[in-house]
Image (spheres, rainbow, N blue to C red):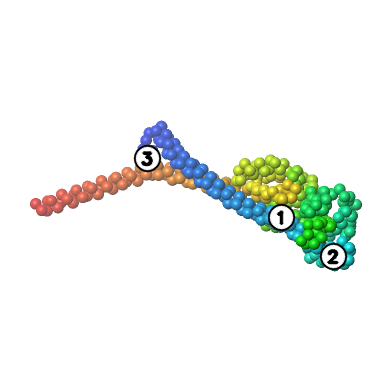
Amino acid sequence: MINLKCSTLKKGKKIRCYVLVILSVLIPILIASYLFVNIIYIKNNETMYNTIYNIGKKQSIIIEDSINGIISDLTLISQDYDPNGEECSKLRFNIEALNEKKGGLYNNIIILDNNLNLLYGFNYNRDDYSNNIYFKGALAGKVGVSEMNFNNRSGSFQVAVPIFETPNSSKVIGVISTKIKTNYLSTLLSYYSVLEDGYECYILDKNGVFITESIYKPDAVGKERVDLNKLKLNIDYDHMNIYKNHMGKNVFGVYFKLPYNDWTLILEKTSDFNEDIKTKINNLTKILSVVEIIVIFFSQKFFPAILKVKDEVEEILEDKDDKISENNKDKKQ
């Protein structure tokens, strides 16, 4: 128990007494505050991780659903394809109507026959379709999503879908394909990126090259690279681990593997908010420690005097009671 009468001791012992009192106050406070800060910090990290995981999961589903939607649209259009060329006007009308509905997403649709000869669309870049592995895959009945093809400031990828003789047939009679620009994917990801400061969502290819835009580096597509293996290792090491992102900022992160050419979706949130909480709690602990030391100091200073007054009052009251008792005895006699 703390001795509250340090001020009654001699000078040397008085100093030691005050030091012991201060230490006995500080040590429990520091231990308690350390435990409290860590509990709050860990709890907040868990909440943050759950939040970014849920957002990242939704983003990955949006990307997958959007590409699956493109495949479905191409499959639907392909049903109007007539190898004899008798329904070309209907096919053209449906493509133009769908393209207008989707805001120009399908400006680059092409249709090839089973010899990979161009039947519909334009070969602006004079590509050699005969060596395109995705078109060959489509002729074998497989849907293909190509690697990214980067140019000066953006990139594009190709979706190739087989054209079957009939919807229930397994015979392939051609290929329908379209090029999708990377800014389409960036637009899909932009919602959560601008919803709140500190969030960034982007997609990397298997080499760690940016497929979509970075809010910190507008020209990152096809140019900037992230050490993807190191990034995944940081996240896999501990899902609540804080690491430095490609901008050197401390962030929480999650990643999701997309089912196309080893693309990886990354969602990161800066940890500044958590650091602010930790700093505020530490500052509050320091203030409370100082206040308690001041209270103890003044109690050491004035408590003995209060006790002395209390003792004197009790002595006076006892003397008064004794006198009253004596007077009562005299009266009875």
Quarter assignment of residue 250? top right
Query: Label 1, on which residue?
Result: 64
Image coordinates of residue 247 in percent, x first then y, are: 71, 45
Q: Earlier in the sequence, mark 1 or mark 3?
A: 3
Quarter assignment of residue 92? bottom right
Q: Earlier in the sequence, mark 2 or mark 3?
A: 3
Q: Earlier in the sequence, mark 2 or mark 1?
A: 1
Q: Residue at x 84, y 57 (%)?
A: 174
Task: Classify 10 Å Cα crowding around label 3: few (below 14), some (14-19), many (20 and above).
Answer: few
CA distance separating discs 2 and 3? 92 Å
Marks 2, 3: nearer the viewer: 2
* Camera-nearest residue between 27 and 151: 151
Quarter assignment of residue 177? bottom right
Image coordinates of residue 277 in percent, x first then y, are: 57, 49
Q: Residue at x 48, y 41 (%)?
A: 31
Q: Amino acid at mark 2?
A: Leu
Q: Say the numbered circle drawn on residue 13.
A: none
* Camera-nearest residue between 296 and 179: 179
Q: Amino acid at mark 1?
A: Glu
Task: Classify 10 Å Cα crowding around label 2: few (below 14), some (14-19), many (20 and above).
Answer: some
Describe residue 128's horizontal placement relative to residue 25 as left or right: right
Marks 1, 3: nearer the viewer: 1
Most extreme residue toward the top is 12
| Visible residue check, residue 208 | yes
Q: Amino acid at mark 3?
A: Met
Describe residue 89's horizontal placement relative to residue 311 as left or right: right
Q: Say the numbered circle drawn on residue 1.
A: 3
Query: Label 2, on which residue?
Result: 91
Q: As displayed, is residue 116 above or below residue 95?
A: above
